[in-house]
Image: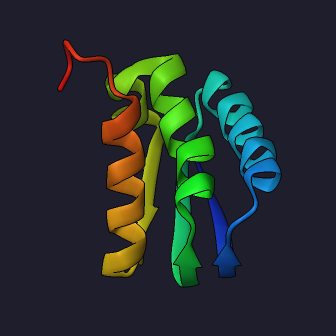
Amino acid sequence: MTKTLKYKGSLANRTAAARERAQIEALAQQGEQVILDYSEVISLSGSYADELFGVFTQRHGTQALRSSLKVKGASQPVAHAIGLAIQHRMPASAA
C-alpha cells in the first residue's frame, strides 16, 4: 500500500523532522511505501533534510530508502538539500 504525506511552506525544524521520520519509519515497517508530496514546499533546511533523510538512510540503508520512500514535486533547491543529506550519511562503502 501507499501513503502520501503532503507538506507546504518552509521545513526547517530538526525536531519536527525527527517526528516525521518516526512516522515514516512506522509506516515503512507496516509495509507501506511513503510518498512525500513536496510540491508546495518553498524551502527545506539542511538540518531538516539531515534529520529526516540522512538519519533514515544511516539507520536503514539506501535500499530501504529507495524502496520505502519517494519524494514528488520537490523544487531543485529542495531536492538538492535532500541529496546532500543522504550523501553525507551514506556509509563509505555505499558511496
Picture layout, residue 65 above or below residue 82: above
Q: Residue visible at 81% across and 44% down?
A: 19
Question: In the shown orientation, is residue 17 left or right of residue 41?
Answer: right
User: Visible in this render: residue 1?
Assistant: no
Q: Residue visible at 62% across and 56% down?
A: 48
Image spot of residue 33 (x, y percent) = 52, 41
Q: Residue visible at 51% across and 43% down?
A: 53
Count of marks placed on residues: 0
Image spot of residue 24 (x, y percent) = 67, 40
Image spot of residue 67 (x, y percent) = 38, 34
Question: In the shown orientation, is residue 47 left or right of residue 91?
Answer: right
The C terminus lies in quadrant: top left
Question: In the shown orientation, is residue 14 left or right of residue 51?
Answer: right
Image spot of residue 36 (x, y percent) = 55, 61
User: What colouring style does the render use?
Assistant: rainbow
Q: Quadrant of residue 41?
A: bottom right
Front one among 73 and 11: 11
Q: Quadrant of residue 76?
A: bottom left
Front one among 46 and 18: 46
Picture layout, residue 53 above or below residue 42: above
The N terminus lies in quadrant: top right
User: Visible in this render: residue 42?
Assistant: yes
Picture layout, residue 53 above or below residue 63: below
Q: Quadrant of residue 49?
A: bottom right
Q: Residue visible at 54% across and 70% down?
A: 37
